[in-house]
Amino acid sequence: MPPKPHPKSPRQLPMFAPVETLDRFSALAPRYDVLLCDVWGVVHNGIVAHAEACEALARFRAGGGTVILISNVPRPSQWLINQLDSFGVAREAYDGVMTSGDVTRDVMAGRGAGAVLHIGPPRDLSIFEGLDVRFAPMEGADYAVCTGLFDDTVETPEHYRGLLAKMRQRDMFMLCANPDLVVERGSALVYCAGAIADLYVAMGGEALYAGKPHRPIYDLALAKAAAARGAAAPATRTLAIGDSLRTDIAGARALGIDALLVSGGIHAGELGTRDIPSAAALAAVCGAAGVTPTAVTPRLVW
């Protein structure tokens, strides 16, 4: 069933009801017991924490709710927790963390010992720690693990077309540790591993995407939420929050749970402004993505 409009904050979007736009998350929060909240673009922008979002999550928890941060970062959960600490995200804002790096490590462990071609920067090497893998060039690797671009400040996926063509000739399997296409870093957008994996698939290659919008990361996140609460919450009382229609919103909808789109994130440029999204632009973007959120808010604010 579509959510009932809140009497004060929501304004109906005329072009594709029953989506609500919210000024404040407190209008929506009482409907849910568990939040699966995206990190990059919602909780921080890659440089500093969004203080109002952190406060909103902490207040939700103070009211008895459970918050699991769910991220496509291609590194283990502990790495992300350390980063959140450095950005000033209080531990009171969340109960647990689940990353696509965790899922990637599970997949690699299941494949056993082998030679891996790592496509990505050295900062992602923690994803391999403790696993029985060794690094190899493309010609000698059993499969590839893509965590990102070697230099996302200057490169685009097209820089990798030659390498991907050689991989395709060998029918190499690619494990994509971050299905995001782009992510915010400050006010800029940079390419992620998902853009390389998508290009490889378009060239006929085989890729497995470890994170959102694919189900394994949600199953693990929901298990963490159930452990924190002592019991699983009903799907009708679970909400996903994120700024990406392709990953956060599509993943939630495929799982059968509600989804709140933070429109001031990576889609802000398509939606007019970071403050008030254009209803027409929002309808067009959602239509192109083939997915509609339950509600929309410019930013996560209590």
Image: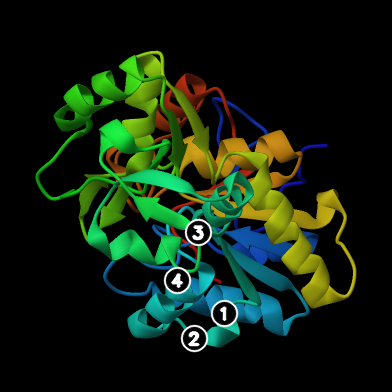
For the N terminus, the image quarter is top right
Q: What residue would you read off at disc 1? A: 93
Q: Is residue 133 visible?
A: yes
Closer-to-camera residue (184/7): 184
Taking 38 as reference, is 168 left or right?
left
Q: What residue would you read off at disc 4? A: 80
Three-letter residue code for mark 1: Ala
Q: What residue would you read off at disc 3? A: 132
Q: CA distance from mark 4 to mark 1?
A: 14 Å
- Assess disc 2: are there few (<14), some (14-19) or many (≥20) residues with their C-alpha within 10 Å of its C-alpha: some
Q: CA distance from mark 3 to mark 4?
A: 23 Å
Q: CA distance from mark 2 to mark 1?
A: 6 Å
Query: What secondary structure is found at the residue carrying circle 2?
Result: loop
Q: Earlier in the sequence, mark 2 or mark 4?
A: 4
* Quarter holding residue 121: bottom left
Q: Earlier in the sequence, mark 3 or mark 4?
A: 4
On screen, residue 43 above or below 19: below
Q: Is residue 271 visible?
A: no
On screen, residue 140 above or below 258: above
Do the CB atoms of the residues marked 2 and 1 lie less than 8 Å apart? yes
Q: Position of residue 244 (x, y in %)?
A: 46, 43
Which label lies toward us, 2 or 4? 4
For the C terminus, the image quarter is bottom right
Q: Earlier in the sequence, mark 4 or mark 1?
A: 4
Do the CB atoms of the residues marked 2 and 4 lie less than 8 Å apart? no
Question: Which residue is pictured at 38% across the width and 31% down the height?
Answer: 197
- Assess disc 4: are there few (<14), some (14-19) or many (≥20) residues with their C-alpha within 10 Å of its C-alpha: many
Q: Earlier in the sequence, mark 2 or mark 3?
A: 2
